[in-house]
Image (cartoon, rainbow, N blue to C red):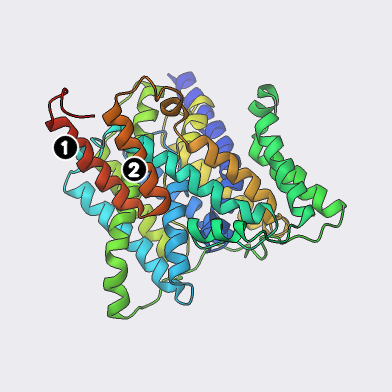
């Protein structure tokens, strides 16, 4: 009995430490990509990771900033660049919505989103992340949205060759690191450290992520006027739906890895508490993170202690190593995020698209197009409705 407890604790500690190390470059990258800064990404990973671990319904889930959530927050941050308080209020409101979903026990319904809709949405998110990182890859300022990023690229911007070298090096490292080395040192962390050292040693003149306060976060949320509140309310609702879908999909992955069953409503409450407090303390909203969760489980984690350890590791990094993190070039993060964008895309669906029914393909491509060039929440809504219509039409009649 005692040996089993020690084995469990050891697995949770090792899993949490591994997940925390992997989360560092992702939190910093998503923070910068969101427009709120690297510190916001780190704060979000700490706060959401801790609350979701303590109060969520998936014992081994690691939560923090994710690609889909960052894309929405970035679009809102660009819209309210002169009033970032509204962005933090929006994230807290999205957390409140998630708590309400959990209390009203709607978790099981969120899990019913059709697979072609999820596939199109995730592939679209991957395309957005890649597109938005091309400007930083070339040493240019980030753009506020997909269309503006494309316009900027078509204008043939001046290229900072030093940024390209660093971003390309980071991309090569995350793609080509041998699996044996990757099991010991996460490729994204290896890219982050190696390319930052390269930039410092060669005295590269490239934009860096800048100041990260090496103190625990303080309350950042501030009052906003009533008009702004009602303007951001539907955006908060959309963000909460996205975060809920994102988290519960990761919970399903964790179930398969551990042969357990999560409590979807409890998970929504835990995610909601995490996002609510992340917004209050200036952190980036997030969700259950699939890659970090799987690595946590494969490292031996079996209980919610692992998620707590993950947050404690990030707190230690924040308090001790923040001055060093300030040196990280933005181009390096862009290389890492491009790899994440590629990984998010549903390549299995794309590779087998010729074998999939025409109606599912149409749903997937419709959601993909609207996600990239329109509204993310509208994309999911249209996809669900279109899928339902096709289900009602007899097989001989639909495409």
- Figure quadrant of residue 226: bottom left
Tags 2 and 1 in contact by the CB under 8 Å rule? no
Q: CA distance from mark 2 to mark 1?
A: 15 Å
Vertical placement of 43 versus 58: above or below? below
Q: Residues within 10 Å of mark 2 (few under 14, many from 20)?
A: many
- Residue 270 visible, this angle: no
User: Quarter of the image containing the C terminus?
Assistant: top left
Residue drawn at x 48%, y 72% is 81
**Residue 394 as seen in the image, left or right of residue 286:** left
Residue identifier under label 1: 389
Residue 149's tag is none
> Which residue is more in the foreground, 361 or 64?
361
Residue 367's tag is 2
Vertical placement of 133 versus 343: above or below? below
Q: Secondary structure at mark 2?
A: helix
The residue positioned farthest toward the bottom in the image shown = 225
Image coordinates for residue 396, horizontal then vertical, percent: 16, 22
Q: Residues within 10 Å of mark 1 (few under 14, many from 20)?
A: few
- Residue 244 visible, this angle: yes
> Which residue is more in the foreground, 116 or 265?
116
Q: Secondary structure at mark 1?
A: helix
**Residue 11 as seen in the image, left or right of residue 392:** right
Residue drawn at x 39%, y 45% is 369
Vertical placement of 271 versus 37: above or below? above
Marked residue nearer the N-terminal end (2 or 1): 2
User: Quarter of the image containing the N terminus?
Assistant: top left
Residue drawn at x 64%, y 34% is 186
Image coordinates for residue 67, horizontal then vertical, percent: 47, 47
Vertical placement of 64 versus 390: above or below? below
> Which residue is more in the foreground, 109 or 294?
109
Image coordinates for residue 334, horizontal then vertical, percent: 63, 50
Residue drawn at x 22%, y 40% is 386
């Amino acid at each position: 009995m005692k040996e089993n407890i020690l084995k469990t604790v050891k697995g949770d500690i090792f899993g949490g430490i591994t997940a925390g190390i992997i989360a560092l470059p992702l939190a910093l990258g998503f923070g910068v990509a969101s427009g709120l800064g690297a510190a916001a990404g780190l704060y979000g990973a700490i706060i959401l990771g801790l609350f979701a671990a303590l109060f969520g319904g998936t014992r081994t889930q690691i939560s923090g900033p994710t690609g889909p959530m960052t894309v929405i927050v970035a679009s809102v941050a660009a819209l309210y660049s002169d009033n970032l308080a509204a962005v933090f209020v929006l994230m807290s409101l999205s957390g409140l919505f998630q708590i309400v979903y959990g209390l009203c026990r709607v978790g099981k319904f969120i899990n019913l989103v059709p697979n072609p809709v999820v596939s199109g949405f995730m592939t679209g998110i991957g395309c957005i992340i890649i597109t938005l990182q091309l400007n930083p890859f070339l040493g240019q300022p980030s753009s506020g949205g997909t269309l503006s990023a494309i316009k900027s690229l078509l204008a043939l911007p001046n290229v900072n060759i030093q940024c390209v070298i660093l971003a390309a090096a980071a991309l090569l490292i995350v793609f080509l690191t041998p699996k044996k080395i990757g099991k010991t040192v996460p490729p994204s962390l290896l890219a982050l450290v190696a390319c930052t050292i390269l930039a410092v040693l060669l005295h590269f003149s490239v934009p860096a992520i800048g100041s990260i306060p090496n103190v625990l976060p303080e309350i950042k949320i501030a009052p906003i006027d009533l008009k702004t509140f009602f303007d951001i309310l539907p955006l908060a609702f959309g963000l909460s739906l996205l975060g809920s879908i994102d988290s519960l999909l990761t919970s399903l992955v964790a179930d398969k890895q551990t042969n357990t069953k999560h409590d979807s409503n409890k998970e929504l409450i835990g995610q909601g508490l995490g996002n609510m407090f992340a917004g209050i303390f200036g952190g980036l909203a997030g969700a259950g993170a699939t890659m970090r969760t799987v690595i946590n489980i494969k490292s031996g984690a079996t209980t919610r202690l692992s998620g707590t350890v993950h947050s404690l590791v990030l707190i230690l990094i924040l308090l001790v190593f923040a001055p060093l993190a300030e040196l990280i070039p933005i181009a390096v993060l862009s290389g890492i995020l491009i790899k994440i964008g590629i990984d998010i895309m549903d390549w299995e669906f794309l590779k087998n698209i010729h074998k999939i029914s025409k109606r599912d393909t149409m749903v997937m491509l419709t959601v993909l197009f609207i996600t990239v060039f329109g509204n993310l929440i509208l994309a999911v809504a249209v996809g669900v409705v279109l899928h339902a219509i096709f289900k009602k039409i007899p097989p001989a009649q639909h495409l």
